[in-house]
């Protein structure tokens, strides 16, 4: 088949003959199949070709010509500058019909009729709109035994349009395409639909929920999206769920999840699309209270996500991507529902702690450390897992104690600074001085929760210097403990720590060599002179606004120091308004 230039293809299409059009389109499609960048000089011609193809799609066509037309639309819709023929209601309705997701009762609000003050092709003419609807109903493919190649090509075209064009997104929302695709998503156990139909149904749903807030809310509430997609995920993974919220892959009951064969590539791809859609429609759930019925749905979803976390895909890279989407979604679930991570019974080979199965928590910890060691885009890659572990530890006693045993074991090394070394504690303490505030705060919060929000214990494991940022933000620089319900822990002091406790510098958190006293041998007058010299230096820097001296207020927060405060400090350097906090005390209650 010879290649044809665009003008020749248009000429053949303009004849209206199906055979001529088929030959021309097949040649064009073969030539442009892998093309994703387009010549700007041919922009008008491509738009004209799009209009001609849409005209053909509303006629009775041979199956081969129909498929060729849709393939051409898919190729043309890759060009974001040539989407005008496809973004009006008539064109989108046509594609929706061939995708078998059209909703006949869809209404078209006035705001979708025009964009930037320009009328759409079919916008304001009610007579023409009615005629178009009639033509669409007559030419729509039959619902029984549908041609799945046709459906896939139409879905791909709609996805391209949504990806590149805001008007197309608006029209898709007005046409209620989410309702049509949700109806097919309900058929997750129906073997009729092949992998490609399922995948592009999910990809379309993802784009709609990512790009349109109204569609996101509609799927979550009106269409019960969490339950719908949870069932779809369960079917995709081939799970059977017991009444105790323990999941198992059908045919592999009783076998530990980590010993199951890896998920197929198609299973993994479908599951990841579902996880992304669920993330879109649940991202604000943990900020509000859920009722008993909703909680049951989320706990069921949590049980499925636990299975995802313990499963493996085809290859390490794909497994990590799968786990990443799982962790992101787990972070959206209401906190009380996270107890499903601990529900499975302890089996041979399970990690047990306090009689509880810690396999899922241990997997989260390993996933978090892997992201931490990689050190790439920590805010995007590390924080979801670190936040999830923090909140799980805050609400579940067994989780906190297990994580503390792994991250903050009894302290033996008192000679190296907390941030020096390769233990998980060292790595997280290093993050407490990270340049990114979100990373720094999240790391500090995690360790603070593991310390039951006890200032003395927090300083013991991190050093006062590393801890100061979080303590200042919470008004805890004078010591004490944040309110919180935490159980009593056993004494964690080791023999090594007890022996060195008196010599540990609370600022650095380690035993340091004794330094010579720089004021040794000075008279009181010389000491006072040096003190005033230092005060004057601070005063000069402060007046020039190079620094802002601060002092610890009575409420434990930092306040600005005035020149008068500096002179008072110089005259009475040892006078304290109250006893300093005992940073070495171990508050275990």
Image (tube, grey):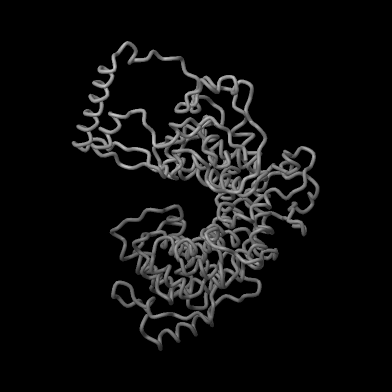
Q: Quadrant of the C terminus?
A: top right
The vertical placement of 14 against 524, above or below, is below
Between residues 82 and 186, which one lies in front from this camera angle?
Answer: 186
Between residues 478 and 40, which one lies in front from this camera angle?
Answer: 478
Specify the farthest residue to the bottom: 127
**Horizontal side, residue 309 vs residue 385: left or right:** right
Q: Residue 169: where, in percent of width, then height? A: 43, 67
Q: Is residue 312 visible?
A: no
Q: Residue 76: where, in percent of width, then height? A: 41, 62
Q: Is residue 11 visible?
A: yes
Q: Residue 411: where, in percent of width, then height? A: 59, 27
Q: Quadrant of residue 366?
A: top right
**Horizontal side, residue 220 vs residue 570: left or right:** right
Q: Quadrant of residue 312?
A: top right
The vertical placement of 496 against 125, above or below, is above
Q: Residue 357: where, in percent of width, then height? A: 73, 43
Between residues 332 and 185, which one lies in front from this camera angle?
Answer: 332
**Horizontal side, residue 246 vs residue 193: left or right:** right
The vertical placement of 334 against 134, above or below, is above
Numbered marks: total: 0
Q: Residue at x 31, y 62 (%)?
A: 43
């Amino acid at each position: 088949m010879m290649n044809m230039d665009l003008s020749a293809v248009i000429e053949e299409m303009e004849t209206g003959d199906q055979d001529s059009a088929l030959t021309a389109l097949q040649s064009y499609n073969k030539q442009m199949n892998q093309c994703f960048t387009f010549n700007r000089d041919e922009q008008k011609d491509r738009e004209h070709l799009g209009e001609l193809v849409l005209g053909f799609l509303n006629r009775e066509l041979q199956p081969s010509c129909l498929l060729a037309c849709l393939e051409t639309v898919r190729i043309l819709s890759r060009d974001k500058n040539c989407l005008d023929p496809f973004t009006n209601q008539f064109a989108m309705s046509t594609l929706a019909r061939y995708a078998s997701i059209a909703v006949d009762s869809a209404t078209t609000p006035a705001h979708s009729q025009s964009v930037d003050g320009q009328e759409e092709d079919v916008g304001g003419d009610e007579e023409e709109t009615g005629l178009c609807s009639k033509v669409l109903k007559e030419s729509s493919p039959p619902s029984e035994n549908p041609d799945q190649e046709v459906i896939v090509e139409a879905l791909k075209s709609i996805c391209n349009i949504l990806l590149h064009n805001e008007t197309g997104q608006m029209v898709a929302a007005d046409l209620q395409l989410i309702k049509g695709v949700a109806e097919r998503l309900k058929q997750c156990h129906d073997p009729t639909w092949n992998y490609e139909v399922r995948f592009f149904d999910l990809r379309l749903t993802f784009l709609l929920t990512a790009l349109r807030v109204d569609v996101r809310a509609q799927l979550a509430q009106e269409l019960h999206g969490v339950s719908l997609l949870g069932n779809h995920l369960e079917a995709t993974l081939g799970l059977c769920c017991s009444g105790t919220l323990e999941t198992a892959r059908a045919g592999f009951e009783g076998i530990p999840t980590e010993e199951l064969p890896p998920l197929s590539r198609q299973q993994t791809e479908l599951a990841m699309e579902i996880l992304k859609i669920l993330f879109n429609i649940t991202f604000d759930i943990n900020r509000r209270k859920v009722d008993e019925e909703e909680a049951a749905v989320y706990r069921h979803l949590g049980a499925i996500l636990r299975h995802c976390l313990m499963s493996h895909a085809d290859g390490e890279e794909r497994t990590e991507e799968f786990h990443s989407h799982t962790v992101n979604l787990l972070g959206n679930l209401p906190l009380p529902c996270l107890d499903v991570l601990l529900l499975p019974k302890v089996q041979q080979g399970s990690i047990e702690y306090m009689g509880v199965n810690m396999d899922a928590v241990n997997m989260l910890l390993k996933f978090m450390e892997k992201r931490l060691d990689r050190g790439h885009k920590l805010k995007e890659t590390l924080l979801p897992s670190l936040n999830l572990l923090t909140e799980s530890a805050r609400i579940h006693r067994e989780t906190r104690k297990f994580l503390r045993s792994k991250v903050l074991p009894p302290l033996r090394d008192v000679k190296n600074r907390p941030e020096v070394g390769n233990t998980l504690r060292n790595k997280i303490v290093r993050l407490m001085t990270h340049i990114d505030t979100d990373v720094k705060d999240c790391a500090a919060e995690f360790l603070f929760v593991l310390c039951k929000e006890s200032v003395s214990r927090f300083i013991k494991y991190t050093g006062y210097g590393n801890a100061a940022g979080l303590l200042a933000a919470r008004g805890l620089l004078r010591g004490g403990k944040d309110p919180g319900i935490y159980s009593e822990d056993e004494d964690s002091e080791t023999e090594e720590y007890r022996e060195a406790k008196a010599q540990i510098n609370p600022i650095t958190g380690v035993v340091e060599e004794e330094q010579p006293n720089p004021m040794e041998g000075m008279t009181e007058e010389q000491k006072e002179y040096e003190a005033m010299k230092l005060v004057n230096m601070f005063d000069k820097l402060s007046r020039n606004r190079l620094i802002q001296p601060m002092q610890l207020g009575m409420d434990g927060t930092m306040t600005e120091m005035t020149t008068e405060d500096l002179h008072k400090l110089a005259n009475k350097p040892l006078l304290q308004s109250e006893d300093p906090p005992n940073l070495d005390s171990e508050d275990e209650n």
